Image (spheres, rainbow, N blue to C red):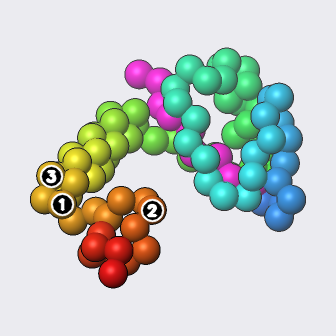
Amino acid sequence: MEKDLLIAARPAEGFRRCGVHHPPAEVRHRAGTFTEDEVKALKAERNLIVMEADPEAAEEGAGKASSTRSGSKKKGADPKPDDPTPDGTGA
């Protein structure tokens, strides 16, 4: 099974490799984004930090986050974006 790649650049301004600008903040790239040869080049690049991650873990975490957000909306806990107060009353 292919793995997702978590990539961060070592230079503060980021680093370009395989046609992609990689910022210093870690970015998840889904399995299949890069060819096998590109993955080898990314992992060999000293200016990048490359880690593998299970795709299932990302999907599971995203599902939990979605259900948490939708659950809080059902309770009326989230204010509307244009409400100036945290309780959503606008007062």
Q: Which residues are magenta?
A: 1-9
Which mark lies nearer to you, 2 or 3? 2
Cα distance in 3D space between marks 1 and 2: 15 Å
- Vertical position of residue 76 compared to residue 31: above or below: below
- Vertical position of residue 7 compared to residue 2: above or below: below
| Residue located at (40% from left, 33% from top) | 55
- Disc 1 secondary structure class: loop
32 or 64: which is nearer to us? Answer: 64
Measured as percent of width and height from the top left, residue 64 is found at 24, 47
Crowding near pointer 2: few (<14 within 10 Å), some, many (20+)?
Answer: few
Q: Amino acid at mark 3?
A: Lys
Cα distance in 3D space between marks 1 and 3: 5 Å
Crowding near pointer 1: few (<14 within 10 Å), some, many (20+)?
Answer: few
Assess whether mark 2 and mark 1 are in contact (beta carbons under 8 angstroms): no
Point out which mark residue 76 bears: 1
- Disc 3 secondary structure class: helix
Cα distance in 3D space between marks 2 and 3: 18 Å
Measured as percent of width and height from the top left, residue 49 is found at 68, 52
Which mark lies nearer to you, 1 or 2? 2
57 or 39: which is nearer to us? Answer: 57
Quarter of the image containing the N terminus?
top left
Please give the residue where the numbered disc 2 appears in the rendered image: 82
User: Is 21 covered by the magenta stretch?
Assistant: no
Image-based side of 19 in relation to 65, left or right: right
32 or 71: which is nearer to us? Answer: 71
Place residue 10 in its image quadrant.
bottom right
Q: Amino acid at mark 2?
A: Asp
Question: Among all residues in the image, which is located at the extreme left?
Answer: 75
Q: Is residue 88 visible?
A: yes
Point out which mark residue 74 bears: 3
Q: Amino acid at mark 1?
A: Gly
